Every structure is written in structure tokens, then in C-alpha cells.
Image (cartoon, rainbow, N blue to C red):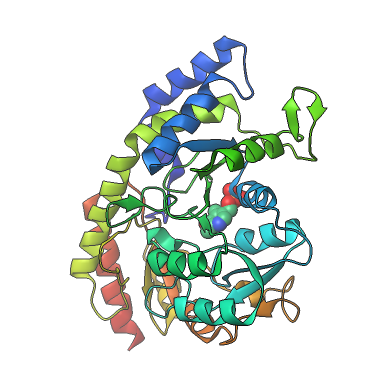
Amino acid sequence: MIPQADPKAGYLAHKAEIDAAVAKVLASGWYILGEEVRSFEAEFARFVGVRHGIGVANGTDALEIALRALGIGPGDKVATVSHTAVATVAAIELVGATPVLLDVDPDRYTMDADELADILKREPIKAVIPVHLYGQPAAIDRIMQLCDAAKVPVIEDCSQAHGAMLGNRQVGAFGRVACYSLYPTKNLGAFGDGGIVVTDDADLAKRLRELREYGWRDRYISATTGMNTRLDELHAAMLRVRLRHLPADNERRRAIAAIYDKELRHIGKPLVGAGVTHVYHQYVVRHRHRDGLRARLKAMGVATNVHYPMPVHQQPAYAGRVALGPKGCKATEALSAEILSLPMFPELPDEQARKVVQAIHSCIQLLH
Ligand SMILES: *Cc1c(COP(=O)(O)O)cnc(C)c1O
């Protein structure tokens, strides 16, 4: 079976370095918020091109403390998309705010900037969370123009786009603050849960650090009410190893995508915007017989996945009560029935990517 993702292969590719990093932490006697976390925060912030990094326990917490640090809470409306990991929307409700779910651009699958322009005129939106989905930047230049003009802070959800760029600037360096999940299958993944928030704003960074650990300014003295969402030394040490390999890993993802781009026929392929460096967290194709195609591929030994099979606004926890933008979510609903994520991870050999292409071509013939 060709897997759709393979986090274990990511461990084996750098086993000696990762094992050494783990052994060093275990022997150090310091396991929470120490030298490894501080170094990882500084190295990751430098990689993105901003000044401050705050390591946290997962991507959902990263979004939650970013919202709280900006003072977003009950009664506040926050615009994002329905076509995202449910975590983006869950974080908005965790701080007591109200999500407003916009549709996506039907070609790029990221926030429809025209709809954002419209809703910023109609409603008192307190923050906007664009999601750089699948490794491709959202229309972040246009989104920043609109939000700057409306004086609304932007929180970038970069959980699928570690290292993606628009022009020569990385995602995560556009908004007021940016949030990353470091879940094992992300482009930069821990071997467990992890997350990081980055910002150029020193005051915001200070608030984020306090919120991460009980609102402490001085140890044991809560200056504000906070939470516990610390990143462990063990994870930070392993993430520092993986961060050194991230540029090469992203290059490898692009090389696999280039094979799919060049060789796949009779199926909808990703459209990449001008000036964009896509990092292919997922390579997502589109076909109107998606479920049949997926079942046949599985029978032929090719695992696929669907990110995501049901838009957030249709899921039982949200259906009928969550607010949508003025256009509804027609593009989101249409694409969620047709999208399919192909095998994509840095250790996937070229010949396996070619096998995936051949399997798709023979399945499509059978479907017609
Ligand atoms: C993975 C992901 C998250 C959530 O991250 P966790 O670490 O699982 O909490 C949030 N947003 C997006 C877009 C994601 O892909």
C-alpha cells in the first residue's frame, strides 16, 4: 500500500539526529520551557522572518491564545472560512466569540477576498483568520489591504503552510500574528502535539507568553487569567532538528507535485497563484466521481484522504446555528464532494508517485 502520509518515514529519515536530541533532553533534567523551547522559538521566528515565537501545546491553542491576546471575546465576530480544519472555527468559539464563515475562491480553495470586502462593510468584524490551505497562501496581500483599511487585525492560520511564500515573504509574516500547528503530519511536525504563535509585536508577544502559562508575569503570580499550553522540551528539541530539514523537505514535496502536475490527465489539478511558493502540505485533485475513484485506488494499493469531507457549517456541532457570509458557501459545498488528497510526504519516492498517476489513469478509464 502506498500511504497518503507517513510520519514514521519522517522519523527514520533523520533517526540519528532525532535520537541524539531526545537523549540530550532526557539527560538534561529540564523538561518544560527551557533552552530547547527558547532556541526553537527563536529559530522558527527567524525562519518565518519575524521577531517573536511562542511555543504552545497544539495549533488549536495557538489560535485560542492569539485571539485572547488581541482581546477578542464574547460578542465579537471573527471571519474565517468553512473549508478548513474544524480547529480554526473551534478556537473562535473557545474564546466565546462568534465565527462568521465565508466561502472560498473556487480555484484556490482559500478565502474569497471579495466576500471579505463585502462583510467588512456590513458587519463589525473584530478579527479575520485566513487559512493558507494545503500549503498555498490565501490571497493574503489583498486580505491585508482590506483589513488594514478597516483596522481589523489578521490572524494567519499557517498550520498547513510552514515555509510557503508570496513573493519573497513567508506566510506568517503578513498578519498581526500567525498560528502554526506542529501535528505529526504537518510540513513541520512534532512526534506528538505541538504548536507555535509568531508575531513582530513585542507587547503582543509578552501577552502571549503570559497567557501560555496561567497568566504569570512573575512565577506563581498570575497578572491575568491564562491557561496551560506549554510546549515540551522533548518536542522542541526534535522540532529543531526537523526545522533544519524543512526547506529540503518542502523542495521534495514540490518535486513530487511537479510529477503529478506534469503527468496527471483528466482530473482537476491544483491552481497555483502568481508569485506563490506552494509547499504542498496536500496535493488535492478534483473529480466528480470522487468516492468511486477513491475506492478503486484503495483496491489498487493507493491510500488517499479527503481534507475535508464536510464543510464546518454542515457538521452536526455547527449546522443551523453558525453564521455564514453574504454569499453562503456554495463553492465550499461543491468542492467538498469532489476533492481528494493524493499521497504526499517528502520520503515518497518518484517511482511511487508515478504509480499513483498510473493507478489514477486506469481508475478513471473504468469510471467512464
Ligand atoms: C492542523 C490544523 C489546525 C489544528 O491544529 P492542532 O495542532 O490539531 O490543534 C488548525 N488549523 C488548520 C488549518 C490545520 O490544518
Give the quadrant of ligand 1: bottom right
Residue most extreme to the left: 262
248 or 351: nearer the viewer: 248
Label total for image: 0
From the image, which quarter does the N terminus lie in?
bottom left
Q: Quadrant of residue 125?
A: bottom right
Residue 98 % position (x, y) = 72, 68
Q: Is residue 163 left or right of residue 100?
A: left
- The image quadrant of residue 106 is bottom left
Q: Which quadrant of the figure has residue 364?
A: bottom left
Residue at 75% across, 58% down: 73
Residue occupying the point 31% across, 47% down: 250
Q: Residue at x 40, y 29 (%)?
A: 241
Q: Is residue 157 positioned above or below 206 on the image? A: below
Q: Can residue 306 be seen by looking at this rendering?
A: no
Residue in view at x 43 percent, y 70 percent: 340
Residue 268 position within the rendered picture, expressed as x and y whole percent measured from the top left: 32, 78
Residue 164: percent from left, percent from top: 35, 53
